Image (cartoon, helix red, strand yellow):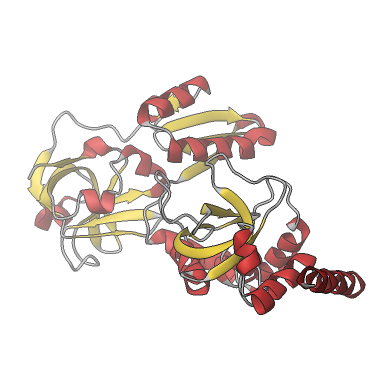
Amino acid sequence: MIIFIFSLIFNVFFLYAIFMKKSITRLFIGVFWGVLGCTSALQAGYSGQVQGVADGDTLFVSRVGAVRLIGVDTPETSHPTKPGQFMGKEAAEFVKKLVIRKIVALEFDEERKDKYNRTLAYVYLKDGRMLNAELIKQGYAVAYTRFPFRHMQEFVKLEAEARQKGIGLWARNGLAEYDWLQEHPHASFTVFEMANRLWGVQAGDYACLRIPSEKLMSELDAYRLAVHEYSPKDLKRFFEQRGCHKTGSVQMAPEKEPKAAKIISWEDAGDYIGEWVTVKGKIVKTHNSGKACFLNFHNNWKKYFTAVIFSYDFYSFPRPPEKVYLNKTVHVTGLVKDHEGKPEIILQKASQIKIVE
């Protein structure tokens, strides 16, 4: 009798879903929670309690283990080699508020596991919302379309809507992320134009030259992966195999240095405008704007001596320079210039600044 009743309920809801064009999966998730209290779903291994959140797109579900959300890509927060990214923490917190220690239902696609042996799934909340879709809808993730999946068109549409609304990752048309990057150390890639409509890329300590336009984006993707995930030994081999050069062999020639430079105090730098000298002093304040790093020898940086490293020369210095040189006594060698009434030296290579204490 019980089997007959459940069979009848199944058929009624199935016909309803067909005629009303409702999602069968979402409909039955609601039935399981409302009528069976998730018991059947749990017995089938499709549900469990969220016990932890690694980041915005990876959960730990009881009886299942690590679950990677299908079709979404959230910014990194805990990658072993990549730095934290814009909106990464916010995406993880958003997920925690929705699912931590709560029962969720899982729906699978054709692929059940990824290369890291994580279960691939669409995760449904008790109210029927899909967590994957909510992340994209609220601007915490983008649609990950590298591999086909059932809800791809829906996710791409949600991403376009979030972009149009200017929320989350798309805030201020990307300027919110740009501002964030100025305050956080990150790998940078400098693209420059070369003769014959070819391109060059400065990637970390390597310069990759004369790249055809049609290969530029694929090369940038490869460089980004290598810089973030390869060991120094493997990174060296990677760039050498691509014919790239260590920056020392392609670096722009600096201004000619005299054999010896007079050592002066930072307080006297203003008296040596136009001369090549070595300035000695302690760096008491630093600031990296993203376009340049300022090494200040006095808190009143608008008036007193500053050493400046521009972003296109960052690759020549230990990183991040604003932390490496802070509170260090140094010798800075170069041509003293006047900038808006204060003395400064532009640093183009690491040999121009030496830590002495």
Front-lying residue, 23 or 167? 23
Residue 177 position within the rendered picture, expressed as x and y whole percent measured from the top left = 50, 63
Q: Indicate left or right for 131 with 232 as reference.
A: right
Instruction: Tell me the quadrant of the picture where the C terminus can be found.
Output: top left
Residue 37 showing in the rendered view: yes
In this view, 33 is above or below 190: below
Residue ID at (17%, 56%): 270
Residue ID at (59%, 63%): 42
Q: State the image quarter where residue 37 is shown.
A: bottom right
Front-lying residue, 273 or 58? 58
Instruction: Tell me the quadrant of the picture where the N terminus can be found.
Output: bottom right
In this view, 29 is above or below 256: below
Q: Indicate left or right for 168 with 36 as reference.
A: left
Residue 28 position within the rendered picture, expressed as x and y whole percent measured from the top left = 74, 70
Front-lying residue, 312 or 203? 203
Q: Indicate left or right for 232 with 354 as reference.
A: right
Front-lying residue, 14 or 307? 14
Residue 62 position within the rendered picture, expressed as x and y whole percent measured from the top left = 49, 59
Residue 160 position within the rendered picture, expressed as x and y whole percent measured from the top left = 71, 65
Residue ID at (71%, 67%): 158
Number of numbered callouts drawn: 0
Residue 124 showing in the rendered view: no
Q: Indicate left or right for 19 with 197 as reference.
A: right
Report the residue that reaches farthest toward the right.
19
In this view, 248 is above or below 68: above
Report the residue that reaches farthest toward the front.
1
Residue ID at (46%, 31%): 207
